[in-house]
Image: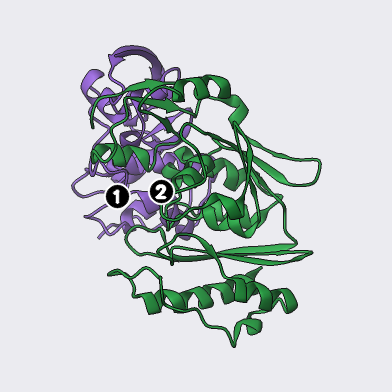
Amino acid sequence: MYAFNIERPSTIAGAVDALAKDEAQALGGGQTLIPTLKQRLASPDTLVSLTGIPEMQGICTADDGALCIGGATSHAAVAAGASAYPALAALAGGVGDPAVRNRGTIGGSLANNDPSACYPSAVLASDATIVTNAREIAADDFFDGLFATALDEGEIITEVRFPVPEAANYQKFLQPASRFALVGVFVAKYADGVRVAVTGASEDGVFRWSDAEAALSGNFSASALAELSVPADGMIADLHGSAEYRAHLVKVMTGRAVSAA
Amino acid sequence: MTEVKMTVNGKAVSGTVEGRTLLSQFLREDLEMTGTHIGCDTSQCGACVVHVDGQAVKSCAMFAAEADGAEVTTIEGMANADGSLSTLQQAFQDHHGLQCGFCTPGMVMSAAALLAENPKPSEAEIRHYLEGNICRCTGYHNIVKAIQAASGQDVAIAAE
C-alpha cells in the first residue's frame, strides 16, 4: 500500500469536511477498498473512515413504513435487524462470509457498485431511495454502469430507504471461487407492480428486466416467464460462464425467486 | 503517524501506527503476538480472524487505526486463565482438527464467534459459518467435529 493518513470523524458533517480535501477518499468497512489499496490500485492521501459515525448506524422504520438503514450499517447488522424485510435480511446474510459481513457496510457496497455485488439488486428492485449528505437519489437514477454511481466527489451515503414489498426474494447463483453472484436476481412485488433487478450478469452492472416485470405484474408466478427470453448481448462472458449461460441463468433465477417469494 | 490505544486480551496497549498499518500487522509486529496468522493477505483465507468488540473480523482487512478504542481478542487470549486449553481448543486437539496448524488460530476464533451466537450449531451451520476460513490440509471434517464436540454434541472421538 502507498502511505496515507486515516481520519475517523464522529459526525457526518465532520466526514464531509474531511472529504473536501484533495485526494481524500471515504472508507466504509474496507472489505473491497483495503484489498484494492494493497494492490496499489488506489492512492488516496487521506482515508476518511465512516464507521465511527453513530448517526450513520442502525435500522429503523419511517412513518410511511419504509425500512431505513444507516449507510455505515454492517451486513451482519442488516441480516440480524431487517426482520421487517426478510428478503433483504437474507440477502445481507449471504454476502461474503461472517467476518466480511461484520465489517462491510451497505453504503460502501452501493457506492462501489461492483457489477456482481448483491445489494444493488435489492435497492433497484425495491425502488429504494439513496439518501446522501446533500440530497435524495432514486434507485433508478443512482447506478451508472460498472463501479460508477450518481454520487459526486466527496458525497456520502448516509441512509438507504426501502419501501417494504408484499412479497420478495433474492436468488444468487454463486461464482464458485469468489462467491460473488455469477447471476443474482431480486424480485419484489408491490401493490402497484413487480420489479425485477439483476446483478452479476450485465456488462453495464445491475439492471431491471422490464419484460419480466410486465409479465409478473399480471401473473405473479414463474410460469408467467415461460415465453420470455433474455438476449445474450451485453452479458458478461468469462471463464465462469458465457454470455448465453448468464442470459439463461437470469430467467432461471428469476423463476426461482418468484416461486420462493 | 497516529497514536492508537486498544485493549488486547484484556490488557491496555498502545502504539504509534501509520494510516496503512493493518490490525494484523500491529498485533504481530508491534505487539509481537504472532498467533494471529497472515495467510493470503487478501481477506479470503481467514487465518487472521480476531474478535473486535466481540465480532469476528479479518484483521488483515482492517486498519489498526480503526481499532482505536476497541476490545480485541486474539488466539493468545483464548486459553483459560491458568494457561490450560479452553474447551474449544481442547476439542481441536482431541479431534485432531488440524494438520499443519496454520489456519487453526482463525478457525478457533471463527468457531468461538459461531458458538457465541449459536451454542449448538448443526454440522451444516458449522460448515456454512466457516465459509471464510480456508484449510488446505484437513478437508474440514475434524474441524467440524471439534466444534460440534466443543458445543457439547456427541461426535465419534476417533479421528482416523
Amino acid found under the numbered disc labelled 1:
Gly
In the rendering, which numbered label is found on residue A223? Answer: none
| Residue A164 position in % (x across, y down) | 72, 54
Amino acid found under the numbered disc labelled 2:
Ile
For residue A5, above or below residue B78: above
Say whether residue A260 is visible. yes
Marked residue nearer the N-terminal end (1 or 2): 1
Give the SS element for disc 2: helix
Residues at marks 1 and 2, CA–CA distance in whole angstroms: 9 Å
Front residue of B88 and A64: A64
| Residue A158 position in % (x across, y down) | 59, 34
Tell which residue pokes out farthest to the right in this image. A63
Seen at 30% across and 68% down, the residue is: A238
> Is B82 left, or right, of A166 in this rendering?
left
**Parent chain of label 1:** B
Give the SS element for disc 1: loop
Give the number of marks. 2
- Which quadrant: the N terminus of chain B? top left
Q: Colour of chain B?
A: purple
In the rendering, which numbered label is found on residue B97? Answer: 1
